[in-house]
Amino acid sequence: MRVRTVSLVALAVAGIIAAIAIIVAPALSAATAPPAQPTPGAATQTLVASAASPSASPSATPVPRPTIVKKYIRYGDGRKQQTAAYCKRHYHQDTWVLKAPKAIVLHHTAGADWKSAWNLFDANTAYNNEKPGTSAQFIIGKDGTIYQLMRLDHRARHAIGMNWKSIGIEFVQEPRAGKDGHWMDQQILNRTKQVRAGLKLVRYLKARFKIAKTDIVGHAMANDSRFFKDYTGAKNAAGDWYKAETVKFRRRL
C-alpha cells in the first residue's frame, strides 16, 4: 500500500509540473523572442495622419486683397530713365525697379479729390529742378475708393530717402488756412470710409511684402526710418502724418 501511495503522489506531482510547463512556455517564448519589425511606411503613415488631423496647427489666414481701382499714370521709357538717373544720384542705384519693398510711407494730398493728385503725378512736372516728377503707388479717396497709380515693382518719387525701398500711399485731404498737418491727419483718421480703406490696404501690403508694423511711417517720420538714405544730403521737410497720428493708425491695424 505504501509503494502504491508513493507512486500515486509521484504521478500527481509530475502532472502538475507538466501543466505549469504548458502555461509558462508561451510567456517565456514571447519574452525571449526578438521585437516585431514595424510594417514599412507605418511611421510615415502615422506622421502624415497626425499632421492632417484637426488638432494640427492651422496655417496663417491670408490677408484679403481689398478692392482696388487701377488708374495708372504714364510711366514709359522716358520716365523710367529719369527714375533710374534720380536713384543713381540719391541712392547709388541705377534702376527704376522697386524690389521687395520693406516700408510704407503715409501721405496726404493738398487737394479736395483724388483726380487733382492723379493729374499732378501723371504730368511728371520737375520737382526741385529734378525729374521724374512726384508720384505715389496709391491714392485713397474720401469715399474709401483705393486707386492704384503704378505697378508695385515701379519706384515712385514720394519721399526723399525712401523711394528705393518703400510704397507711397496718399490720402485725399485738402489744407485749410490756420490748420497744421496734425489737424489734416486727424481729419483722415476721423473719416470712417477713408481710414478703413487705408487700413485694409496697409494690412494687405504688410502681409504680402512682410513689412514690420514699425516700418509703416508717416512722411514727417521718414528721416528717422531705418531705410532712409540719400547720398546728396537731402532731407524731408514734410508736415503730413506726424508720429502721433501714425501711431494711432498703426494701433488700428
Image: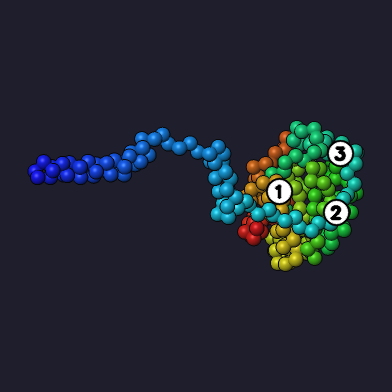
Residue for badge 3 = 80
Give neighbour class at mark 1: few <14, some 14-19, many 20+ (Cα, 10 Å): some
Give whichever of 219, 10 is nearer the camera.
10
Q: Can you see residue 106?
A: yes
Q: Residue at x 85, y 54 (%)?
A: 70
Q: Does 187 sit above or below residue 96?
A: below
The residue at the point 90 percent across, 46 percent down is 74
Residue 70: mark: 2
Amino acid on which disc 1 is placed: Arg
How much space separates mark 2 and mark 1, taking CA atoms?
18 Å
Where, quadrant-wise, is the N terminus in this rendering? Answer: top left
Q: Residue furthest front?
A: 1
Number of residues whose C-alpha sits closer than 10 Å to that of mark 2, classed few (under 14), some (14–19) or many (20 or more): few
Q: Nearer the viewer, mark 2 or mark 1?
A: 1
Identify the image quadrant of residue 183.
Answer: bottom right
Q: Assign the C terminus to one quadrant of the image.
A: bottom right
Looking at numbered disc 3 in the image, what kind of residue is underneath it? Lys
Residue 28, located in which quarter of the rendered image? top left
On the image, the x and y values in percent for residue 111 come to: 83, 60
2 and 1 marks in contact (CB < 8 Å): no
Q: Nearer the viewer, mark 2 or mark 3?
A: 2
Name the N-terminal-most of marks 3 and 1: 3
Q: How is the image coloured?
A: rainbow
Q: Earlier in the sequence, mark 2 or mark 3?
A: 2
Q: CA distance from mark 3 to mark 1?
A: 25 Å
Q: As shown in the figure, which amino acid type bears the numbered disc 2? A: Lys
The answer to whether residue 161 of the structure is visible from this angle is no
Give the structural element (helix, strand or loop) at label 3: helix
User: Is 166 left or right of 17, judged from the image as shown?
Assistant: right
Q: Name the residue that disc number 1 marks.
A: 208
